[in-house]
Structures are given as C-alpha cells and as structure tokens.
Amino acid sequence: MRLLDHIAQCTEPFVVRQDRGDVWRLAGANDFALALARCPLRYVLNDELVRTCTALAYSEGDELSGCLDLLRIPAEQLWVEWNEAARREELVRALPDCTGGATADILRTGILISADPLGRSGRLRTFWLTRCEPHEPLLAAVETLIDLDGGPSTCPPEALLQGEAIAVFDSRNPQVDRLLHCAGFRLEPSWQRYYFSVATGAETRAQVIERSLAAVAFDLPILLALFLLMAVRDDLAQLPVKPFRLNAKRARLGRRPLLEHIELSAPVFAGASVSRDDGARGTRRGPRFHHVRGHLVRRRNTIYWRGPHWRGHVRLGSVRTRTVELRLPG
C-alpha cells in the first residue's frame, strides 16, 4: 500500500512510555487520518519525476532560489508522496557529501500541505513509512512553515524546544541555504512539551534539535522544484487512480478502502534523466568521460532546464539535446 493508505487506516495513537513509567500521548499519524482522507488533491510522484525534482532543486545555473517569485502552492489542501530511495539516490549524486537526513530504512515519504489561498505560504507535515514490520506510518515531530515572501527566523536553535519557529542555515552549500531562507521549523506542541521535559542535558537537547531538523529540512527543495514544474508546465502527466473494484473486494473482506490519488509524472523530462549505464563497473570508458550536473537558466518568465548527463568521447554514443524550455502559461 501507499503511505497515504497506511495513514488513512491508522487508528492507534502514538504513545511513548519512559523507563521511569511516565506515559506520553504524542501527535502521530492517526491524528491526521481524517484530514488526509478528506484532502481533495493527493499526488504520488513516479521515480523519474522524483529524480528530476531533486536534480532541479540542486542544479547549477540560475538555480531554483532565483525562481521563487514564480512559485505557488497549487492547492489549499494537498498531499505529495514519493519513493524515498529515488530521492536519496539523486540527492547523493547531486550532493555527494550530504545524506539529506534520510536513512536507509525509510521506504516512502509524504507531505500533507495546508496553504493560504494565494499559495505563497503554508504548513507542511512530514510522514514516513519504514521497513520495520509491521509497517507503521510515522509523523515528524517538526512541522515546516513556508513563506515564499518572507525572511528567515532570527530565533536561536535552542528556541525550538521553547515552542518557537527557527530557521535552518547551510553555510557549506549556498544553494540549499537560499532555499531554506523561506522556511521556518517548529516542534508540534505535544512533541515540544515531551522533549522539553525529557531532554534535560545540554548534549541531549542539542541532539534532539539536530536530528529533528535534519529529518525534514531536505523535504522543502523537492517540493519547491515540483511547484515550479507545475507553474511553468501544463503537460505533467496525471493518471487518476480510482480503486473501485479493489475497494469493493476489500469491503467484502471487511477491510478499509484505499484512497483515490493521482500518479504524477513528467514525460518531457524522460530524455534528460541520467543514464544508469554510468561506467562504474570498472575501467574508464573514454577520455574525459564525466558527469555533468543539470543547469537551470532563467530568462524573465522562461526557464531552460538542461538535464544532468554524461559527457565523453563520441564513441560512447550520440548525444541528443537535453534542453527543455519551461514557459509560464499565457
């Protein structure tokens, strides 16, 4: 099942019991089951679109941060889900020194978005599905506050445990840093009270802050890249998934129905994806055979995207054009 179905069918509250016997009822996936079931627009991204959005988010050239004025969150209530392995694979390629806060045991990631009517600000709640059996959907303790017209918070990191919204910066990577300027991060109230109570030592508090932020900070770039594609392309392929027959069978077996959703892909970028035959099996295949990262170039309201590709000797094969023009409708 998709992550969205795991959440919609989650009925168990998230409870933490301390060694000393204290019991904490924390916000969990079951608290958002009804909201997700009522969400009018649910997208599930295919793997190639996930890779494209990740490459676009960390591309060279004018970069995604130079196009924030073109972005709009496409709906007031929105769900976006993807295969974490595809995002992690492209993230490692784009930022070899960065793990992105993603761990190998995460199978799928999903974001529940609530936006203002203008689509320039909103709140993001992050969910995961892990390899652990039985599969239980997990909710991130931190919610992301996005404001495409605002500036970063000035609160220090320690204010996160006080219930304040704080900013995240990345001095090692200017691209990521500029994208993070439009986001704030805040602990969900029940998690804030829990961590404030149990994380008493300075080292423990620092670990809680670092791990909580690292778990969600890399969600924002892929979402912004997706919103950019939605703003400048009207030909993203949308395949509605309406499991009527399957749900009829599930109803006969006394099982909860699966949610309708839209599988989203971008065929126009299929030729721009990185070849999986990357010559990593052994020896060098030709002179100056190397990988070229994607390039994003903006000319007013037109964006040109040259997808990541391999460059080398002509004997390696002919190179087709990888430049895609993205123009605002109208």
Image: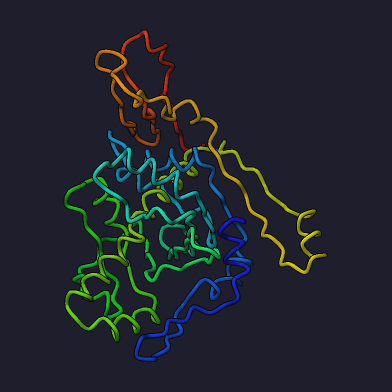
Q: Is residue 124 left or right of residue 215?
A: right
Query: Where, by quadrant of the figure, is residue 303 drawn?
Result: top left
Residue 185 rendering spot, x and y as whole percentages: 32, 67
Q: Quadrant of the N terminus?
A: bottom right
Establish if 153 lies above or below 102.
Answer: below
- The colour style of the image is rainbow
Q: Residue furthest top?
A: 315
Q: At which x and y percent is residue 277?
A: 42, 24
The residue closer to the viewer here, 19 or 223, is 19
Observer-nearest residue: 186 or 310? Answer: 310
* Most distant residue in the bottom direction: 21
The percent coordinates of residue 59 (x first, y second) are 32, 37
Nearest the viewer among 132 and 204 is 132
Compared across the picture, whether 212 is left or right of 330 comes to left
Along the line of sight, which residue is nearer the eye, 108 or 56? 108
Q: Looking at the picture, does residue 49 appear above or below residue 204?
A: above
Query: Which residue does the image show at 52% across and 71% down from the upper left?
Result: 29
Question: Residue 204: image x %, image y %?
Answer: 22, 75
Badge count: 0
Q: Which residue: 54% across, 76% down?
A: 31
In the figure, residue 161 lies in which quadrant?
bottom left
Residue 166 lies in what quarter of the image?
Answer: bottom left
Q: Looking at the image, which residue is at 40% across and 49% down?
A: 224
Considering only vertical position in the picture, is 74 above or below 11?
above
Q: Which residue is at a point 35% across and 83% down the rendered structure image?
A: 194
